[in-house]
Image: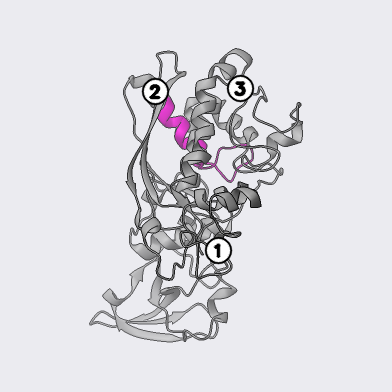
Amino acid sequence: MASRGSFAMTLEGLVEEETNLNVWVLNPYPRTDTAHWESRLPKSGRPEYVPGVIDTEDADGGLTVRTTWEPVKTVTGKKEEFLPMDPVSARDVYCIAFLKNLHEQGILDNLQKRFIKNKTYTLAGEVLVSMNPYCELKDDEGVAHHSFKMMVKYAQARDDAIDSMGEHEDEPGQLGVHVYGYVENIYRSMMKKRDSHTIVVDGEAASGKSELFKRSMEYLLNMHCVERQTKGLESSTLVNHREKVLPDDLCQPLGSTNMPFIGRKVTGLEHALLEAQPLLEAFGFAKTSLSKNSSRVGRTVKIYFGTDGLVVGGAVTPFMLEKLRVTSFSERTERNFHAFYQFMAALSPEEKKSLSLRAKAKDMRFSRCAKAEL
């Protein structure tokens, strides 16, 4: 299984031979000297480990290892103090399960190499690992990673292409690992087994959980609706502020000015489920120093499909709301829920005066924030 796919990623200075002498060494470089890793690992902080090559091994299991970074440093220690490194030919794998050495450093290194290549999705068996690039990415043809055209690409793919998603991702025309393909695979499994399926989205603060959830909703409700069944997947009837959707719009990221993420000529039910998301976010999301739209609410979203595979119902149930954000007033370092600021922005000076509200949100006790930039 480890030989599946073609991985040509190499790291300068590492040994490529049958006997793998490459190991991970605890970072010996000073914390203040950031030049050692900023040029080699863009978009990253100081790594805990750096690559090294074994020079000698004594009879007692002691190793002498030299780093592959300049200036070269020599580190000695017991064999168990170093972490084994996967062969160079097995780097940048689309599924973490294919790594020979499943330790934290090996997993992080693989994700790092993929992130640098704008491959923000990686499989770990049946789990999808998503990394937040904090921007919308595009492929070599200028198609946004989360666009209507990208949706159609995965919805039209054959079963075998979806099942092997990512296996040949570096070859032209092949499917890479993507949330759309992941959700499409779950949808097809649901229709085949006629059984309920669950997607759990979890992660640390500002990791992109809310965006991943919205991408999943966008895909299901836009690709598997009456509109797509009657007019075909490529029917370009998504919401647009113009009467006509231009071909270039289909390549734009959903959520942009030209391509809002909600459907237009889908049924009223699907439209309601998608259009409700910004409203729900107003009462459960807040702007922080890490994210403009940070979730402060836990929720369960159920989408019901009929035997024909089309949406027949849905429900949103919040199960946790951080009410402390409303009741705590001491030196708030993050904004309150969006609703407070949206309400203040919508009122005229006369309306604010009639409600005994101050002119600006930052002057209000419920919406004051210690950080001026928020």
User: Which secondary structure, mark 3?
Assistant: loop
Q: Position of residue 26 (x, y in %)?
A: 38, 78
Label annotation for residue 59: none
Q: Which residue is mark 2?
A: 304
Mark 1 / mark 3, whichever is N-terminal: 3
Q: Looking at numbered disc 2 in the image, what kind of residue is underneath it?
A: Tyr
Position of residue 125 relative to residue 158, above or below, is: below
User: In percent of the image, x 59 and y 36: which residue is there?
Assistant: 261
SS label for mark 2: strand
Mark 1–mark 3 distance (CA, rounded to whole Å): 46 Å
Closer to us: mark 3 or mark 2? 2
Q: Which labelled disc corresponds to residue 233?
A: 3
Frontmost residue, 340 versus 245: 340
Give the amino acid at mark 1: Lys
Do callouts 1 and 2 mark residues in contact (Cβ within 8 Å)?
no
Is residue 192 found inside the magenta-colored segment of the image? no
Q: Residue furthest left?
A: 60
Q: Which residues are magenta?
A: 165-187
- Residue at point 62% right, 18% down? 232
Give above or below for 263 relative to 119. Answer: above
Q: Given this view, does label 1 or label 3 mark the residue nearer the observer?
A: 1
Q: Report which residue position mark 1 lands on.
A: 362
Q: Is residue 170 magenta?
A: yes
